[in-house]
Image (tube, grey):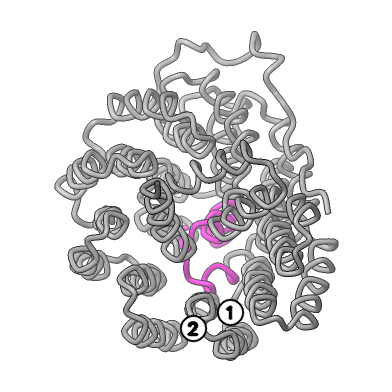
Amino acid sequence: MVRRCCFILLLLSCSSGFADSKTSAKSPASVSEGVQLPVTTASSLARTDFEAAMQNFEQYRLNESLQFLRAATKSDPNFAQAFIMIAKISKDPAEQAEARQQARRLASAASPGEQLLIRWLAGAQEDNYLPAIAAMNDLLAKYPHDARLAFLAGDWLTLQERYHQAAIVLEHALSILPNYPAALNDVGYTYAFDGDFDKAFAAMDRYVALVPDEPNPHDSYGEILRMDGKFDAALEQYRISVRMDPNFGSELGVADTLALMGKEQDARAEYDRAIAFAGSQGDKVQYQLQSALTWIREGNHKQAERVLMDVARNAHAAGLGKLEAEAHRILALYQPNSKSAIKELQAAEYALQEPHEISVTDRNEEEARILQVEATRSAEGEDMSSAAKAVSQLEAMAGKSRSPVIQLCYHAAAGATLMAQEKYAEAISHLEEDSADPLSMRLLWRAYSRTGATADAQTVASKLALLNVPTVEQALVVPQFRASLVSQARQP
């Protein structure tokens, strides 16, 4: 299944018609009317609150952004654009669903551009990716000089892990407003995810210089330093952010960094601080989930299982079905016994089927992740019939959805199943599609090694050993992989 397709229009050929590229602006709101996407509201107070919300969104102050958006919809209950932005930003599935429904209902009274925005952002949450992407393309073509819109598209593409396309759109935003902090932040991430840390650090240096009194530049710098294995420097940046604003959330960055350094007890203390300052119930449960991974890193199976079950219960009580399912899925990955893993996957499935509010995209993508683990664990347990069934279900899902998550889950599951059958050449073509995931990377390294592709194996091994992301897959694979490389190097 080919998952690469053109997601965006390249709008860089008409740069001579852009707003003055020498303009210095911390917000793109100063661009002349007609250049930007309209904001349709009859209330001047709602308009003011909406602009404040967008500025907070650009500074990654998401809780403050939501507060202003909620205020805007109170001042103008017919404010469609404010509702769709609530749907995009909120981590409360019920609020997200209600806001998305309101935006859809009110779209006909909004401008044509806002209708495209709603079609894009709502479609992305409803697993209607092709219409959503078409709407985004049309919107970018309609407002090629709107730096904020380009940032919004680049930000979304980054979250979709479409880093090359995201970089193009974000660089376009910077061609309009070279000193646009939000675009510098996101483009720095795209460079880092592509492994170009020199360009990433250059973007971060500019970002910090433009808004030195905001916490997010230091938080972002810390994350990119951590990705490059510069843990002490990362901690320094995160702690600057914490000192600037203890409510911003950079305690999570400190905790994740300590966890990757192997300082799990210290990390748990920082996770507790992050939980205390969390701005939403969803954040609290997510941070609890991150904290649970410290027990996996320590190899304490009993404690990891106990804490993950607590997380699943907390998520259930809060109506967070996706996080409840994720907790069980992580347990399935960690279980040493394949049969026990399958029981956890069944619990994850039940969590998704419960009557909790959850977007179609979130439900389908978590279902795909569950099927991926089912295929992998079944293949490990030599239950090839169950593995093949899970792969077949994923192939059907991938044929219907353009979700990058679903596409990657299919390739990962197919590659793992083929590896279990020692069909290495066939496995490689699938695993190369998911070459950023630690589990698939380890299998790809093995497949290259078994087929004599020594140089390719060494490239993957180097990349895998340097992977510093605070995920369960990294915790399960990378520390052991690094140790095995050290052991091999010591052998005569």
Q: On screen, 166 above or below 248?
A: above
Which amino acid, by three-letter code, is at mark 2? Gly
For marks 1 and 2, give the CA distance.
Answer: 7 Å
| Residue 415, quarter of the rendered image | bottom right
* Residue 244 seen in render: yes
Expressed as whole percent of the image width and height from the top left, the position of residue 388 reads 80, 75
| Residue 358, quarter of the rendered image | bottom right
Expressed as whole percent of the image width and height from the top left, the position of residue 469 reads 42, 53
* 451 in the magenta segment: no
Q: Do the residues labelled 1 and 2 touch (CB within 8 Å)?
A: yes
Q: On screen, 99 above or below 447?
A: below
Q: How crowded is mark 1: few (under 14 residues within 10 Å), some or many (20 or more)?
A: some
Q: Which label was assigned to residue 319?
A: 2
Residue at which label 1 appears: 357
Q: On screen, 160 above or below 100?
A: above
Q: What stretch is highlighted in magenta?
A: 74-98
For image coordinates 62% across by 28% down, the residue present is: 168
Element assignment for label 2: loop
For image coordinates 53% across by 80% down, the residue present is: 332
Which amino acid, by three-letter code, is at mark 1? Glu
Element assignment for label 1: loop
